[in-house]
């Protein structure tokens, strides 16, 4: 399992490097074959976290209403529940590498039948995938972001992405995919990174944030933050007929983020990794 995860992380990082190179050069390596041997620079730092606990709570969408939500799997901050605030999370501990990241991340629970499945690998990438990485600013403390659509009624309402570890021949889908034996079901979710510069949350928990358009933030969302990409791997392969999320079908996959990064640690990573387009590890130092 450890060998598979190592290979997966390397494959994902190569894929992200190619994507960023295409963005920064206005094309891909296929369009510029003479660049194929060039060093690819990637604006990135990561947090490797673990499963913490499971509760039918959602402190962003349903605050102070314990048990009112569908089941969520929480990663990072060990204290997250329906009553969580920035101050309460700040006084707790987390399980991420790096240890200073005590932010809270959560997703709907995956079930096979009535059996909950714990993800076996959880990585959060902070990326500089915009036209001007030098303009990216630190994510403000206490910021709440929701990505995806828990109420999606079909794939067209969804930004979910499901695929198979090490098996690119299986086309990605917004619903569960059938993965070969020995592989794992994986999903990744990109969060909006354009902030209105004022609100740490909004009534619908989305209107204070927006996605870039053609690599630039809309005028109403002038502050560019690093893009959070949530990547999860589940020890699942084969038949998917009994798979479901606590929120419904695979296309209802969504994620929540409550930022509790220490400002100095976030600032250092933005300055030394993202703004200058350098690939950094969990410690925030160049790899």
Image (cartoon, grey):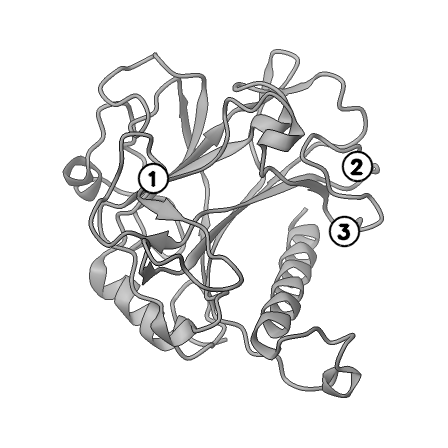
Question: Which structural element holds mark 1?
Answer: loop
Q: Earlier in the sequence, mark 3 or mark 1?
A: 3
Task: Using residue 19 as the reference point, say whether residue 247 is left or right of it.
Answer: left
Labels 2 and 3 touching (C-beta < 8 A): no
Q: Quadrant of residue 94?
A: top left
Task: Give whichever of discs 1 and 2 has the lower sequence position.
Answer: 2
**In terms of image quadrants, where is residue 83?**
top left
User: Which residue bears the numbered disc 2?
Assistant: 179
Estimate the x, y position of residue 98 in percent, counting from the top left. Answer: 37, 57
Q: Is residue 78 above or below residue 13?
A: above
Which secondary structure, mark 3? loop
**Which quadrant holds residue 41?**
bottom right
Query: Number of labelled discs?
Result: 3
Q: Which is more toward the observer, 82 or 211?
A: 211
The residue to which callout 1 is attached is 207
Answer with mark 2 or mark 3, whichever residue precedes in sequence.
Answer: 3
> Could you give the CA–CA distance between mark 3 and mark 1, rounded to whole angstroms?
36 Å
Please give the name of the residue rendered at 64% of the width and 24% of the height, measured from the top-left corner: 154
Residue 78 drawn at (x, y percent): 32, 35
Q: Nearer the viewer, residue 197 or 54?
A: 197
Marks 1 and 2 close (CB-CB < 8 Å): no
Vertical relation: 225 (above or below) 176:
below
* Separation of marks 2 and 3 at Cα, in angstroms: 10 Å
Query: How far across and how far down the image is residue 151, in percent?
Result: 51, 22
Residue beneath disc 3: 166
């Amino acid at each position: 399992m450890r060998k598979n995860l190592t290979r997966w992380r390397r494959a994902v990082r190569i894929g992200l490097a190619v994507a960023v190179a295409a963005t920064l050069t206005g094309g891909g390596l296929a369009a510029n074959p003479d660049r194929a041997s060039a060093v690819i620079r990637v604006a990135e730092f990561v947090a490797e976290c673990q499963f913490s606990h499971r509760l039918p709570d959602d402190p962003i969408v349903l605050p102070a209403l314990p048990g009112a939500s569908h089941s969520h799997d929480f990663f990072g901050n060990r204290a997250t529940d329906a009553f969580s605030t920035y101050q309460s999370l700040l006084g707790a501990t987390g399980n991420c590498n790096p240890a200073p990241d005590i932010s809270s991340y959560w997703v709907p629970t995956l079930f096979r039948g009535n059996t909950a499945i714990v993800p076996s690998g959880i990585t959060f990438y902070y990326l500089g995938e915009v036209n001007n990485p030098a303009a990216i600013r630190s994510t403000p403390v206490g910021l709440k972001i929701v990505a995806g659509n828990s109420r999606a009624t079909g794939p067209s309402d969804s930004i979910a992405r499901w695929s198979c570890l090490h098996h690119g021949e299986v086309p990605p889908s917004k619903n569960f995919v059938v993965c070969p034996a020995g592989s794992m079901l994986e999903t990744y979710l990109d969060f909006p990174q354009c902030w209105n510069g004022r609100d740490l949350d909004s009534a619908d928990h989305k209107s204070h944030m927006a996605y870039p358009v053609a690599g630039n933030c809309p005028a109403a969302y002038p502050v560019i933050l690093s893009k959070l990409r949530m990547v999860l791997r589940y020890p699942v392969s084969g038949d998917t007929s009994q798979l479901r999320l606590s929120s419904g079908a695979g296309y209802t996959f969504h994620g929540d983020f409550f930022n509790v990064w220490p400002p100095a640690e976030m600032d250092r990573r933005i300055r030394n990794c993202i703004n200058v387009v350098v690939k950094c590890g969990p410690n925030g130092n160049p790899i």
